[in-house]
Image (cartoon, rainbow, N blue to C red):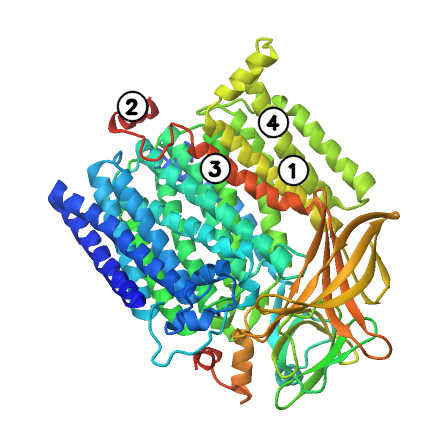
Amino acid sequence: MSLMPKSRKARRRLAAVALAAPILAGAAALAFYALGDSVSFFYSPSQAKASNVPAGRTIELGGLVAMGSLKKTPDGGIAFSVADQKDAYPVVYRGEVPDLFREGQGVVAKGAFGSDGVFRATEILAKHDERYMPRELVKALKASGEWRGDPQTAAAK
Amino acid sequence: MIAEFGSFALVLAFALSIAQLGLSAAGRLRGNPSLAGAGEGAAGGAFICTAAAFAALTFAFVTSDFSVVNVAANSHTDKPLFYKITGVWGSHEGSMLLWCLALTGYGAVMAIFGSGLPARLKSTAVAVQGALGVLFLGYTVFASNPLLRLPNPPVEGHSLNPLLQDPFLAIHPPFLYSGYVGMSVVFSLSLAALIEGRVDAAWARWVRPWALAAWSLLTIGIMLGSFWSYYVLGWGGWWSWDPVENASFMPWLAATALLHSATVTEKRGALAGWTVFLGLVAFTFSMLGAFLVRSGVLTSVHAFAIDPARGVLLLSILAIAAGAGFLVFAWRAPKLAPGGLFAPISREGALVLNNLFIAAATAAVLFGTLFPLIKQAASGDAASVGPPYFNRTFAPIMAAVLVVLPLAPLMPWKRADLVGALQRLLAAALAAVAAGIAVVALARPGDVVTAMGVALAVWLIAGTLTELVQRVRGGGAKASEMLRRFVGLPRGTLGMSLAHIGLGVFILGAALETSGRIEAAQVLGLGGHMNVAGYDLRLDKVAAVQGPNYTAERADLTVTRGGSPVCAAAPERRFYPANQQTTSRVTICVQGPSDLYLVVGEPRAAGGPSSWLIRAYWNPWVRLIFLGPLLMALGGALSLSDRRLRLGVPRRARAAQAVAEAAE
């Protein structure tokens, strides 16, 4: 007695599943494996403080560049502080600064906290559009009461 | 006056799309050719009216008519004429109008030149295309009209984002949109075939030229976007797996899979359901892209013209169009006639494998792109997925595709001899292994990933060339005879080979550039030196320059290598007063296939004489990354010029013959 189904249609279906299943399962396994350390979560400074982000974990830190905090370091890098109304964290960064990066502007820095509590950014979100703000940042700013209106409507005025 | 005329034309286009849908559907239901003909006429009319609206908006931009909201928000009198014109599609509203222009344009071409299609299929397809027109034109008229007037026009406009004032980006949207929206015809034909309940070899033959044209345009559109982001943004990279980039890449992947599965349907009558499914998926991804790019639901560095309120409307359009498509698919696909069986070792077997892997790769990209949304909905945490995810999933899956790729053209349909095909590719395999070993042993010791990339690229290029050579050689033919045979090859075959070589060229460039890139950044005073990849850079002078609508600081750098001059570079840092925005103007010293890429940063006056941050990137073989897709698109165009595939050529008689052949 054969285990293969009798009808031609069912056999065809079985063959298709037998071929597709390992490839799709492999792709899914690969996806979940790769996702593990590629996902980074977004924190505002007060959220980062509350959840006590461990040093070395890659996160996105978003807030406003505190007024008067931006300094250029002699090695070609910059130091500034990312703040919301409750907390602020010092950030150091070497590399290209987005053209729209300035004090008082919203910023999202990607990187990790060092053991000294200084956030070492590897990437600063470059925006192409002065009206654009990352959604996470808008939410965090609204939550902390620093939101200054919808940039779209502001621009239309 | 012109703007009101444009608004009127736009509303008329919307009404004509409704007429196109109604008349074509009625023509099909009653079997009435005059009603169907009227529907085709309405399709032509919708295009003419949309074109008139587009022309009116262009006129408003060229004449800087700031009483039109869109012009006031996106133009400026100081802007050069070229960028006044390209500003038309620089905003949300204008780009949706461009989308509608392409959509009605494709509908009109299908209605007027698609005389080879069977009458019923054509009427249904024109009706579906009309329904898409109703959705998108309705959106443009009611929610995103670019021709609205301002009650109190300003004296001067806000000007276009200076990053968009670039020749490559200016022509990038027309190509990208022609590609995106070209998939709408495939969508309409797929849905029509499902409604008519007939998906056969002849249908695949009609779909393929549209898919091929859209795919080629999309390839160029993505390449231009990548090239723009490479040399305008000053970050030295060309792809970052950003959601907006992925949004354009997913329809491309679906279209690539579709081209291959449509070949199987055309030649062997098999995979009919799957091909139709891909036809629906390709345009669904196009619409998903339009939604993702404009709604701002995902954090992207390339987000332009976003508007969350309108995002909901775009999502509704996506849900209606794709939902209807897949519902019809679920209902009708099981009733499609099953195709012929085939042996697993055959060309169609290889193409099925290709489709499975591409589908898996597309799913991986889709999952990574939408993961932040899923995560947000599930747990409320904001998250983002970085490039490592995509590199680790997409690259290995596509590597599997590339291993199989050179085998497929060497395998005949129905039943093939795998050992024979492998033997014929022995030289190519040896070349690939040798190239890989050379990289890992000599050029970049221990870098296995690069070695595998180079080996795959060589395997692909050499394997494709082997197939071509074997086609023209044989029987001890002389060179002249071989040339004659080469010219006599079907253009579809040549196009396929060119596209595959283009893919190989791209992979070669990507592997070499990614592993060999060198970055250097240094603060230089006047007369200061820095070194990158054996090139010596000297900062000679920094001067202020005045552009048409910007002021700039220009750094003059002399680049030498081993004492001999290489180039004089003058990167700029531009300030656009109309936008209060600063941008970098990169200078690229082209060194054969490689680039020396120079950016000047902010001045640093702290302590002592003024100095500037100079960043330099050495991007070896980067030109191949842009040449490869160009070859692929050329391959697509070459295939399209094949007489067997020319738009509108297949007549009923031929189609019947093709069906008979496929049934044999």
Q: Do callouts 3 and 2 point to residues on the same chain? A: yes
Residue A106 occupies quadrant = bottom right
Q: Quadrant of the N terminus of chain B?
A: bottom left
Residue beneath disc 3 = B636
Can residue B366 be spotted in the picture? no
Q: As shown in the figure, which amino acid type bears the numbered disc 4?
A: Leu
Q: Do callouts 4 and 3 point to residues on the same chain? A: yes
* Chain name for mark 3: B
| A12 vs A52: above or below | above
How many residues crowd around disc 1 within 10 Å: few (fewer than 14), some, or many (20 or more)?
Answer: many
Residue beneath disc 4 = B465
Q: Secondary structure at mark 2?
A: helix
- Between the residue at mark 3 and the residue at mark 1, the CA separation in whole angstroms equals 20 Å
Query: Which callout, 4 or 3, points at the residue further toward the start of the chain?
Result: 4
Q: Where is residue B102 drawn, in percent x and y?
A: 36, 52
Query: Which callout, 3 or 2, points at the residue further toward the start of the chain?
Result: 3
Query: Which callout, 2 or 1, points at the residue further toward the start of the chain?
Result: 1
- Between the residue at mark 2 and the residue at mark 1, the CA separation in whole angstroms equals 39 Å
Q: Secondary structure at mark 3?
A: helix
Determine whether label 3 and label 2 are within 8 Å by CB: no
* Chain name for mark 2: B
| A75 vs B474: above or below | below
Left or right position of A57 against A137: right
How many residues crowd around disc 2 within 10 Å: few (fewer than 14), some, or many (20 or more)?
Answer: few
Residue A122 occupies quadrant = bottom right
